[in-house]
Amino acid sequence: KGSPSSLMFEECVAPLVDGLFHGYNATVLAYGQTGSGKTYAMGTAFKDGTNSGLIPQVMSALFNKIDSLKHQMGFQLHVSFIEILKEEVLDLLDSVPFNRLANGT
């Protein structure tokens, strides 16, 4: 705790995670010029063996909440991890390196 991403998570993203358990969808979007820190803030880059960006914090909060409520209700989880780079849409969770989203298939 105490890092800029922790503050951003607590102030901006944690309420979105809570909303998921009330039937809402949520999107977290990082936008900015090259080198502005998007990858670092989202937490998809490791630095000194640690990773404290938004994505790891969201996943931790999400699965902790699911674990605490799993005996009260069932869950169905759908996750997307999309990158738009130079007008090309990449599905970062797709094991096939083919860009299906941009090709409309």
Image (cartoon, helix red, strand yellow):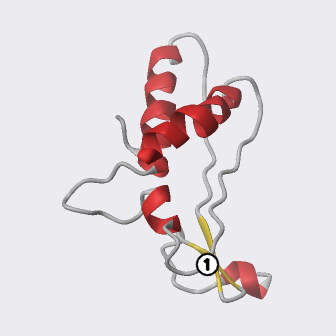
Residue 100 image-quadrant placement: bottom right
Image spot of residue 79 (x, y percent):
60, 51
What residue is drawn where x is 66% and y is 89%?
A: 86
Percent coordinates x, y for residue 62 in the rendering: 51, 33
Element assignment for label 1: loop
Query: How many dots with numbers?
Result: 1
Please determine whether, in this image, residue 27 is positioned above or below residue 63.
Answer: below
Residue 30 is situated, as x and y percent measured from the top left of the image, at 62, 62
- Describe residue 49's horizontal placement relative to residue 7 as left or right: left
Left or right position of 5 against 80: left
Q: Residue at x 43, y 26 (%)?
A: 64
Q: Would residue 76 be visible to someone looking at this image? A: no
Q: Is 3 above or below relative to 43?
A: above
Query: Which quarter of the image is occupied by the C terminus?
Result: bottom right
Residue 9 visible in the displayed image: yes
4 sits left or right of 38 in the view: left
In the image, residue 2 above or below residue 80: above
User: In the rendering, at what x and y percent does residue 34 appear?
Assistant: 55, 81
Q: What residue sits 75% from the left and 87% below the top?
A: 103
For the residue pair 39 and 103, the one nearer the viewer reads as 39
Residue neighbourhood size for the residue with mark 1, other residues' Cα within 10 Å, grouped as few (<14), some (14–19), many (≥20): few
Q: Nearer the viewer, residue 84 or 96?
A: 84
Residue lying at the far left of the rendered structure:
48
Q: Is residue 85 left or right of residue 97?
A: right
Q: Quadrant of the N terminus?
A: top left
Residue type indicated by callout 1: Gln
Q: Which residue is mark 1?
A: 33
Instruction: Specify the quadrant of the image occupied by residue 49.
Output: bottom left
Work out whether 78 lies above or below 20: below
